[in-house]
């Protein structure tokens, strides 16, 4: 046996040992990685949060409320080849020329092939912003040539006030994803606490919590959402409406989670380690939140992830109806308010571009949650 | 059995009373009411006798009375079949809902039949051909469907129809048949319009059900009695449909009661709004927006009633379908 072979043998044994002595989380990670769909979903979710949530100011070429003198301009096509057929490596868009259709009483924009605005990276914006709310900056990932006077680039067109839709979709994502995350965290906090208390104490507490969840469940989801959202006074500030709306979403959704957690706690509280903790003199609170809740966490995380899409969709639907968030707050649902009738779909179809973003993020969350569900139970087969 | 039904009915009754009261509260919640808005509108138009007329209305609907009394009046009339009057249309809620009931139920039933067929057939195929190309395709489609709520799909369909195909697809009837009496031509016109919202509704609800059906089938197909049936030399089709599906279908029955029945009234309100359908859903959302409280409250209570009844029916149907299940 040569030295090389001995070394190989050692490595193989090391690997084998590593496979046997896996911790729970490395097993979870290992199983999760095998599910390609889930990994893709996770990456997309991560990208959404990086682009929209943390660095929207940087990735968006314009700021949220920056208006230009182009109202409902159609998207500009990013081109490499111009009308004469000459190729340029740096992509460009044609300038826009306003025309007014007297018959339809419609303002439209047409390409002005004499003017080309080239795409540049790391373009300084008109107004400074604060990255992550802290670091002052004014650079955007891309934009129209900053050296040319009046150069603009609206890849997804503009809305009725002349705001760049591309930028607004990125900013809207921040609000939509945030309401999904914050709402879900609150739902989990409420559902887990009440579920744990209900399961651990039993008796009257249990009955009260159970009846409460049953009562909330007796209402159908969407009609109740709409009814509660419609009850928010119109004259409240958008921030207040945002807060209340999140609470409404939480209020309707915590019940299902609380029931599942209660079920888990009912079985966990009979385990020996709980008895041990009790005899060691641990308080109820300590037993519940130090010993019992961690045991439910993998389950809660899975359900939580799978519930986020519903959260985002509810917000989108309500805002689209005009019952949810209101401008100046901007979410994907608020963006869709501009296409609430057939006329706007007919003449300004690009305002529908937020739709694929909503669907894409929902899909990603579903794929991620599905993968987590399989992975967090690494000892079980399929 | 009878005792069980009586107990469940009693429970449902208590729930309906509670739910109707809470519904009433929610709808009362916003400050101001429809009449205050109306008063301001009329005054803005320069109607000097507006205040007087609104006061008259207020007295007629009992709006000057305290909350509990108003609820009592509404609830006791509700039992008698008088659901109050819609402020916005100045007509009884009962008539308004009645007008739209036929279309609502027709649309909901069509949607239901399509989505159940798709869910069951697709789920069974997916489970019996696990990991085949067909199963993968169905899984991907189901995921897409799960991620696309009805109203976004409706917006997309509207976009395709209006912008790409240059067709108008809204509503349930063409203009010439809108108020025409029923005839064969009108039915045909309805069918021509109905399939679009029905398919959209089915596309929104079928994927989740299909996944449930698939999961159940997979579980049942792995059980010994299926093995035994196969070992006896029964045809594959018989084993699948007569033995496996018969058991795997139970959750679908529960869904039928708890989701599909309340969906008859309130389902797909958002899709109906996008496509401009004359169903109850848009009426409800509209009533909430304009604080037309009796209208909104009535629809909400009806939906909850359907849900409670649906749950009870589903449980009873389960006992009938699966003798192993006992009610306590």
Image (spheres, coloured by chain):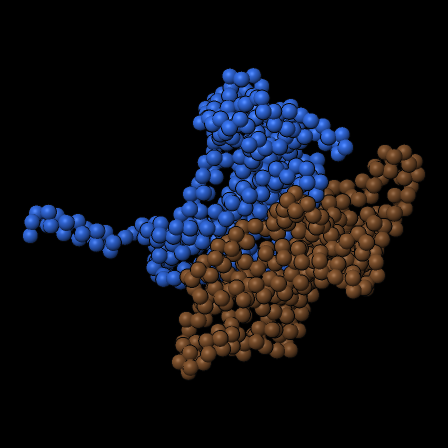
Residue plotted at (71% across, 48% down): B168
| Residue A381 in sight here | yes
Please name the residue shown 52% across and 41% down the image.
Answer: A177
Q: Position of residue A10 (x, y in %)?
A: 14, 50
Question: Is B13 or B136 nearer to us in this picture?
Answer: B136
Please state, as top left, top right, bottom left or bottom right, where the C terminus of chain A lies in the image: bottom left
> Residue sitting at 67 percent across and 64 percent down?
B109
- State the residue lying farthest toward the front: A84
Drawn side of residue A291 relative to residue A83, left or right: left
Residue A75 falls in image quadrant: top right
Q: Percent x, y for residue A123?
A: 48, 22
Which residue is rendered at x = 51% and y = 16% of the image? A147
Q: Colour of chain A?
A: blue
Q: Work out which residue is located at the far bottom of the displayed protein and give it.
A: B232
- Residue B259 rendering spot, x and y as whole percentages: 61, 61
| Most distant residue in the right direction | B49
* Residue B221 sits in quarter: bottom left
Chain B's shade in the image? brown
The x, y position of residue B301, in whole percent, is: 71, 58
Asked if one can make out residue A212 in the rendered structure from this viewpoint, the answer is no
């Amino acid at each position: 046996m040569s030295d090389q072979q001995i070394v190989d043998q050692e490595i193989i044994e090391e690997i084998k040992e590593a496979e046997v002595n896996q911790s729970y989380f490395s097993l979870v990670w290992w199983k999760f990685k095998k599910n390609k769909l889930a990994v893709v979903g996770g990456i997309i979710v991560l990208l959404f949060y990086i682009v929209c949530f943390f660095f929207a100011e940087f990735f968006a070429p314009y700021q949220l409320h920056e208006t230009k003198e182009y109202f409902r301009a159609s998207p500009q096509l990013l081109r490499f080849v111009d009308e004469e057929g000459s190729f340029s490596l740096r992509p460009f868009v044609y300038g826009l020329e306003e025309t007014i259709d007297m018959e339809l009483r419609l303002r439209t924009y047409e390409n002005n092939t004499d003017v080309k605005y080239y795409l540049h990276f790391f373009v300084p914006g008109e107004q400074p912003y604060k990255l992550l709310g802290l670091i002052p900056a004014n650079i955007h990932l891309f934009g129209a040539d900053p050296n040319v006077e009046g150069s603009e680039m609206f890849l997804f067109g503009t809305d009725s006030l002349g705001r760049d839709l591309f930028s607004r979709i990125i900013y809207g994502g921040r609000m939509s994803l945030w309401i999904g995350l914050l709402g879900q965290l609150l739902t989990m906090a409420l559902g887990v606490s009440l579920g744990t208390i209900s399961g651990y104490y039993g008796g009257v507490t249990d009955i009260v919590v159970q009846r409460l969840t049953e009562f909330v469940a007796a209402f159908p989801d969407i009609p109740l959402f709409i009814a509660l959202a419609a009850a928010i006074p119109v004259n409240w500030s958008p921030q207040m409406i945002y807060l209340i709306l999140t609470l409404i979403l939480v209020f309707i959704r915590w019940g299902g989670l609380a029931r599942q957690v209660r079920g888990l706690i009912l079985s966990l509280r009979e385990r020996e380690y709980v008895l041990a903790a009790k005899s060691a003199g641990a308080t109820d609170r300590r037993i519940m939140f130090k010993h019992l809740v961690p045991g439910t966490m993998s389950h809660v995380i899975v359900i939580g992830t799978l519930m986020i899409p519903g959260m985002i969709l509810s917000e989108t639907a309500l805002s689209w109806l005009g019952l949810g968030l209101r401008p100046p707050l901007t979410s994907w649902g608020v963006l869709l308010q501009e296409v609430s009738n057939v006329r706007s779909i007919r003449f300004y179809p690009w305002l529908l571009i937020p739709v694929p973003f909503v669907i894409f993020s929902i899909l990603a969350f579903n794929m991620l949650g599905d993968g987590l569900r399989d992975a967090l139970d690494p000892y079980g087969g399929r | 059995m009878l005792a069980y039904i009586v107990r469940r009915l009693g429970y449902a009754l208590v729930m309906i009373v509670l739910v109707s009261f809470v519904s009433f509260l929610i709808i009362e919640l916003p400050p101001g009411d429809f009449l205050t808005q109306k008063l301001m509108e009329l005054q803005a138009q320069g109607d000097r006798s507006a205040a007087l007329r609104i006061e008259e209305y207020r007295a007629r609907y009992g709006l000057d009375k305290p909350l509990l009394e108003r609820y009592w009046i509404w609830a006791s009339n509700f039992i008698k079949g008088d659901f109050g009057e819609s402020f916005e249309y100045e007509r009884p809620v009962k008539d308004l809902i009645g007008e739209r009931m036929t279309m609502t139920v027709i649309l909901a039933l069509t949607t239901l039949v399509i989505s159940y067929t798709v869910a069951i057939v697709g789920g069974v195929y997916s489970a019996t051909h696990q990991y085949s190309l067909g199963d993968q395709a169905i899984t991907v489609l189901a995921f897409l469907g799960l991620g696309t709520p009805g109203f976004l799909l409706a917006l997309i369909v509207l976009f395709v129809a209006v912008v790409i195909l240059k067709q108008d697809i809204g509503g349930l009837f063409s203009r010439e048949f809108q108020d025409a009496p029923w005839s064969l031509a009108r039915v045909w016109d309805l069918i021509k319009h109905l399939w679009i919202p029905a398919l959209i509704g089915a596309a929104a609800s079928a994927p989740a059900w299909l996944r449930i059906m698939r999961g159940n089938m997979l579980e049942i197909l792995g059980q010994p009695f299926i093995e035994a049936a196969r070992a006896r030399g029964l045809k594959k089709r018989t084993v699948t449909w007569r033995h496996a599906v018969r058991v795997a279908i139970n959750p679908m029955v529960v869904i039928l009661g708890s989701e599909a029945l309340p969906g008859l009234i309130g389902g797909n309100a958002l899709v109906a709004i996008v496509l401009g359908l004359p169903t109850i859903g848009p009426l409800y959302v509209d009533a909430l927006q304009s604080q037309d409280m009796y209208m909104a409250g009535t629809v909400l209570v009806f939906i909850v009633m359907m849900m409670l009844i649906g749950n009870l029916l589903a449980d009873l149907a389960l006992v009938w379908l699966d003798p192993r299940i006992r009610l306590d």
